[in-house]
Image (tube, grey):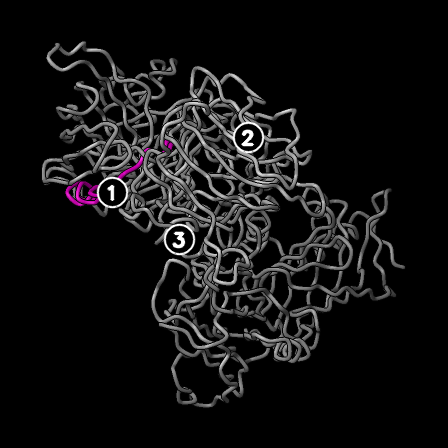
């Protein structure tokens, strides 16, 4: 039990109890209406809450109605080094009369781990706690009323980088292998990040490969590189659920997909009605470790019913049915039994824990039917992920057409993780530089199943197993221009072996299973680049069990080479994909408008007009096609931006516009291989030029659309559908106004904010830890010039300057300022202050680099422009007066 005596909070347990609940209360009260006896909901205000000088918490309201929480020991001005610290997010209990918080300790915390708490609102701007548990599975401690956290002020703007440290569950899946963007080869890892050098960095578990998170104006950029295996991945992520989840798309060496990061130990789904949550569980879920073990869920008012099966529902390896009922928040207790006539005659207890709307953690304990419950704890948890029903269909994505020679849909149960066999009949005809020649492959990075001939003409195989990669390599050379029969057979607990023309040529122990894949089978190539097979592959056969090549049974599947055409000149050519061309986006930094082109003549014309190429938006058809219509371009006469419209015939020319013509053709309906093209419109005010610039921005990237919205563009509007291309990340336009960040000649970094008719400037050279300079200026009537006084190294060693700033509207480098400076006074080492009467002018060109000022520089600038701050002109006047009184003033 806890008391009000501060000395009782010496132990970590008591300290946890005291501070955690108080902060959590804060967040929860704002989520749902309080009971009649509680304080009104509007008593909860975001801000900083302090308990004496012992600890404080920051509470920030999110768009979804929840609250984000940061708690630290100490005070905001002096947090305790290595003191207790955590992030948390608040959700309601089932009866919504009390509230709970899930939290995770920060890497810098004295006490690692995660836990839960219950809290309540004491009164307006005051918080207290009810109970606390320092872990997710231990009973909560009972507590008395104790510490009260009192709101002391508003939150200060902080960098997103601050919130990236800690442990994250990283999940990813490919969307370009199966139809309808169905997830393929999903994976997950738990990764811890530390903040250093303006980014958060970590190491991929089990490797030395770096992974990083870097904040940008549009969100978070993730980068991962495995140099040894030649794999790279970059992702553009946007914060969700108050920054406790990061979601976005990725591009990699092996294709594109989606990626989600969820802070470890915290529920990422927004709070809501439990019935809605349970209803959203209905559908098919997959175990990503295998790709062919499924749960079929059907939501009910009291929970959900489920069927678990392996492989196909029509012919499952096992079949289990059960019923789950709600337990704690986002947790369900279940009982299940194997269906009679199917493996394996067991029954069991299961725990389902909802992590996100599409991910659940599962634990289970099983025992034979007809025997009592052994009362043992459930085993190690594993993750299942919600997928669309099309994952189980034997189809492949249309977008794979033409990427590889022969692509075949995966069959449930082929190839299993624990045992199986592959046989290939082929003749080998190497050409050009030495390379790996893939005969058959499935999976990709971290899930490889690759049967190939290596750079030295040796039969080889690579299997990604659960503990390490298993590589087989024969010592026998594969003779070119001769038909061969090769086998790859494997069985967990025994070995994996290679056979060539009836002889075993390689063997290694296989202690752990293959990681599995739900991606298609590829014959004659791999998802890895530069691995296509030179020669002829007659057939590839697959078995779901280990085989003796001399006594093999009938295969479960045989993939034959395409049949020869009527002329006998090789196989049937693959269906020819329609011809397409890139739709390229351009940006004019002076006129602040975008333009779009598809051919070299148009591109050259735009570049001659001062437009800069920013990259492709997507690919459009060059000729009419089924379900396609024309894409027409128009240009606004006075503003110059491009308007894109669709129609079988030329649409009516918009007002004040000229028609440029038809660029090509675009799809009118969604298809697995295409993506949506959006348009967003903006109007930018430019006080220096005293005009308003209008623009239209077209994109297929939802991340770029979100970033454009933050920069001032309006809601996105659907235009058509195009083939996807990797877009360049969106960059905010640099407006012709004074406020923003500038780069000077040399190492100068300048930052300006405008308040009414006055400008405030802060700058430094080299690093921010060096000397600081501040200026304050009055704008002229033309709004293009400003004059004032600046001070360098404020204090006893300060120098003073007279400045004139002129906004350069003609610079080819975009918004720029020409700074002319005259040194007015400088200190000598002996303490004298020298007034310089004939100082020579120096000039610097300041080029705008960003509309947004970084958080650290902005806070420094805010202090200098705050009411009551001494202006540089006043500081100069005081310094001269003091030097004159002390007989330290000298004229030169």
Which residue is the site of mark 3? 397
Residue 325 placement (x, y as % from top left)? 14, 30
Which residue is the site of mark 2? 461
Earlier-in-chain disc, 1 versus 3 = 1
Q: Which residues are magenta?
A: 272-290
Earlier-in-chain disc, 3 versus 2 = 3
Which residue is the site of mark 1? 271
- Residue furthest toward the right? 892
Earlier-in-chain disc, 1 versus 2 = 1
Which of 80 and 549 lies nearest the eye of the viewer? 549
Other residues around mark 3 within 10 Å, as few (<14) / some (14–19) / many (≥20): many
Residue 732 placement (x, y as % from top left)? 54, 62
Q: Is residue 830 above or below residue 728?
A: above
Image quarter of the N terminus: top left
Q: Which marked residue is nearer to the observer: mark 1 or mark 3?
A: 3
Horizontally, is 331 left or right of 435 in the view?
left
* Label 3: element kind: loop
The quarter of the displayed image where residue 629 is located: bottom left
Other residues around mark 2 within 10 Å, as few (<14) / some (14–19) / many (≥20): many
Other residues around mark 1 within 10 Å, as few (<14) / some (14–19) / many (≥20): many
Label tally: 3
* Label 2: element kind: strand
């Amino acid at each position: 039990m806890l008391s009000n005596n501060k000395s009782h909070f010496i132990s970590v347990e008591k300290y946890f109890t005291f501070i955690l609940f108080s902060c959590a209360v804060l967040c929860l009260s704002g989520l749902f209406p309080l009971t009649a006896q509680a304080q009104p909901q509007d008593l909860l205000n975001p801000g900083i809450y302090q308990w004496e000088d012992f600890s404080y918490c920051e509470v920030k309201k999110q768009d979804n109605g929840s609250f984000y929480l940061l708690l630290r020991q100490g005070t905001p001005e002096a947090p305790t080094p290595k003191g207790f610290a955590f992030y948390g997010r608040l959700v309601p209990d089932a009866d919504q009369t009390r509230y709970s918080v899930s939290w995770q300790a920060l890497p810098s915390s004295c006490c690692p781990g995660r836990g839960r708490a219950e809290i309540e609102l004491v009164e307006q701007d005051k918080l207290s706690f009810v109970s606390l548990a320092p872990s997710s599975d231990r009973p909560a401690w009972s507590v008395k009323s104790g510490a009260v956290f009192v709101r002391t002020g508003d939150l200060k703007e902080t960098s997103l980088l601050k919130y990236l440290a800690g442990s994250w569950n990283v999940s990813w899946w490919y969307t370009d292998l199966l139809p309808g963007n169905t997830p393929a080869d999903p994976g997950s890892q738990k990764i811890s990040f530390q903040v250093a050098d303006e980014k958060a960095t970590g190491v991929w578990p089990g490797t030395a490969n770096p992974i990083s998170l870097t904040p940008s104006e549009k969100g978070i950029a993730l980068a991962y590189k495995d140099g040894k295996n030649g794999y790279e991945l970059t992702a553009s992520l946007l914060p969700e659920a108050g920054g406790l989840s990061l979601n976005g798309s990725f591009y990699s060496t092996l294709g594109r997909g989606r990626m989600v990061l969820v802070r470890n130990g915290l529920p990422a789904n927004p709070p809501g009605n439990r019935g809605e949550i349970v209803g959203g569980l209905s559908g098919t879920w997959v175990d990503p470790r295998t790709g062919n073990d499924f749960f079929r869920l059907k939501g009910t008012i009291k929970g959900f019913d489920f069927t678990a099966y392996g492989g196909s529902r029509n012919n499952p390896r096992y079949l289990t049915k059960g019923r789950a009922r709600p337990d704690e928040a986002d947790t369900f207790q279940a009982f299940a039994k194997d269906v009679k006539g199917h493996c394996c005659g067991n029954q069991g207890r299961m725990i389902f824990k909802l992590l996100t709307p599409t991910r659940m953690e599962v634990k289970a304990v099983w025992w034979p039917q007809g025997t009592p419950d052994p009362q043992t704890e459930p085993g190690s948890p594993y993750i299942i992920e919600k997928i669309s029903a099309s994952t189980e269909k034997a189809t492949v994505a249309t977008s794979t057409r033409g990427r590889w020679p022969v692509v075949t849909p995966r069959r449930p149960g082929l190839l299993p993780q624990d045992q199986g066999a592959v046989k290939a009949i082929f003749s080998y005809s190497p050409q050009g530089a030495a390379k790996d020649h893939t005969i058959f492959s499935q999976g990709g990075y971290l899930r490889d199943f690759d049967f190939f001939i290596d750079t030295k003409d040796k039969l080889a195989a690579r299997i990604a197993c659960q503990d390490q990669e298993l590589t087989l390599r024969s010592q026998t050379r594969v003779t070119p221009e001769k038909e061969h029969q090769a086998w790859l057979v494997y069985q967990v607990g025994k070995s994996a072996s290679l056979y060539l023309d009836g002889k075993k040529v390689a063997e290694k122990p296989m202690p752990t299973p293959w990681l599995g894949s739900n991606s298609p089978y590829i014959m004659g190539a791999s998802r890895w680049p530069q691995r296509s097979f030179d020669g002829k592959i007659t057939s590839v056969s697959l078995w779901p069990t280990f085989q003796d090549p001399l006594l093999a049974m009938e295969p479960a599947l045989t993939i034959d080479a395409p049949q020869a055409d009527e002329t006998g000149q090789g196989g049937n050519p693959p269906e020819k994909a329609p011809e397409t061309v890139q739709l390229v986006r351009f940006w004019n930094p002076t006129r602040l408008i975008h333009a779009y082109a598809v051919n070299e003549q148009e591109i050259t014309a735009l570049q001659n007009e001062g437009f800069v190429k920013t990259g492709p938006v997507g690919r459009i058809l060059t000729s009419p096609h089924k379900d396609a219509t024309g894409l027409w371009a128009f240009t606004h006469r006075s503003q110059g931006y491009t308007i894109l419209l669709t129609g079988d015939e030329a649409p009516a020319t918009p007002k004040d516009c000229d028609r440029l013509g038809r660029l090509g053709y675009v799809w009118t309906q969604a298809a697995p291989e295409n993506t949506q093209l959006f348009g967003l419109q903006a109007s930018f005010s430019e006080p220096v030029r005293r005009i308003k610039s209008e623009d239209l921005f077209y994109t297929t990237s939802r991340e770029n659309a979100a970033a454009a919205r933050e920069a001032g563009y309006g809601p996105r509007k659907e235009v058509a559908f195009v083939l996807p291309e990797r877009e360049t990340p969106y960059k905010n336009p640099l407006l012709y106004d004074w406020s923003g960040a500038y780069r000077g000649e040399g190492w100068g970094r300048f930052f300006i904010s405008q308040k009414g008719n006055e400008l405030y400037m802060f700058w430094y050279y080299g690093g921010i830890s060096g000397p600081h300079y501040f200026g304050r200026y009055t704008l002229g009537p033309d709004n293009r010039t400003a004059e004032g006084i600046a001070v360098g190294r404020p204090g006893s060693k300060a120098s003073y300057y007279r400045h004139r700033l002129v906004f350069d509207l003609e610079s080819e480098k975009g918004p720029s300022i020409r700074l002319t400076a005259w040194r007015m006074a400088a200190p000598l080492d002996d303490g004298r202050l020298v007034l310089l009467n004939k100082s020579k002018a120096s000039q610097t060109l300041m080029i705008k680099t960003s509309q947004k000022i970084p958080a650290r520089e902005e806070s420094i600038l805010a202090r200098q422009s705050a009411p009551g701050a001494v202006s540089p002109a006043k500081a100069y006047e005081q310094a001269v007066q003091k030097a004159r009184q002390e007989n330290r003033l000298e004229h030169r």
